[in-house]
Amino acid sequence: MGTDTVLINGTGIFLTTGDSWDFYQGYSLSVKSVNPDKKQVWVKLLHDGELLQDDILSEGDIFAYSKSSEILSITVDTIYVSPGGELITFKPVYQYLDDDYPEPEIVETTNNSVQEEDQNSTGDPSTVQTGGFTILQAFACISALILCRVAIKK
């Protein structure tokens, strides 16, 4: 495989303040804080716990990390803010193979629970994804945010 090999191809992820998402090859993205007034999010990219890059982003901004070629491209889709917390959706998310690190073993399945079981059974922590939010949980959070706003306005 070469550096143009796609590891994550345009998927979406959902994170709350303080959460992080583990990518392949030891990369992780964490949401440090949200500025609700400006609808901005502070994110940090780490590799094996070491800070590579951080930035403050608004909706529609792209967070990109490159070395000799692009490794990660993450777009801030929406920043939801409520009295109960914040939910940030990142979509699309792309990760490309970093030739400086071992190639990850990618298990392709259509059932997420099977994929998580397969990844957990390998014992290789670099291939295990953090839980994050499922689509159903994200929609439930969005609905709760809308209901909170309606209740506050009354």
Image (cartoon, grey):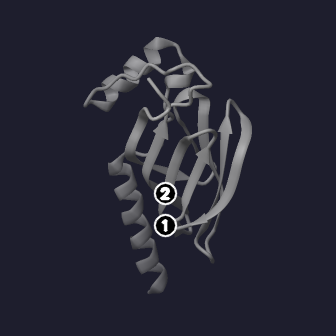
Q: What kind of residue is marked 2?
A: Thr
Q: Look at the numbered disc 1 and give the secondary structure of its residue.
A: loop
Task: Tell me: residue 38, above or below residue 90.
Answer: below
The percent position of residue 72, horizontal first and vertical second, equals 54, 44
Residue 6: image x %, image y %?
41, 35
Q: Position of residue 70 (x, y in %)?
A: 55, 43
Residue at 44% across, 87% down:
154
Residue sitting nearer the eye, 114 or 59 = 59
Residue highlighted by disc 1 = 60
Disc 2 to disc 1, how far (Cα)?
A: 6 Å
Asked whether, in this view, residue 143 is left or right of residue 51, the answer is left
Q: Residues within 10 Å of mark 2 (few under 14, many from 20)?
A: many
Vertically, is 153 above or below 2? below
Residue at screen point 51% across, 49% down: 73
> Is the residue marked by circle 1 packed among few (<14), some (14-19), or many (20+) residues within 10 Å?
some
Residue sitting farthest toward the bottom: 154
Image quadrant holding the N terminus, namely: top left
Q: Is residue 107 left or right of residue 46?
A: left
Front-most of residues 44 and 112: 44
Give the amino acid type for the residue marked by disc 1 in the picture: Gly
Tell me the number on the disc at residue 23.
Answer: none
Tag 2 and tag 1, C-beta contact below 8 Å: yes
Above or below residue 147? Residue 67 is above
Mark 2 = which residue?
A: 75
- Residue 147 placed where, x, y %? 39, 72
Circle 2 — which element?
Answer: strand
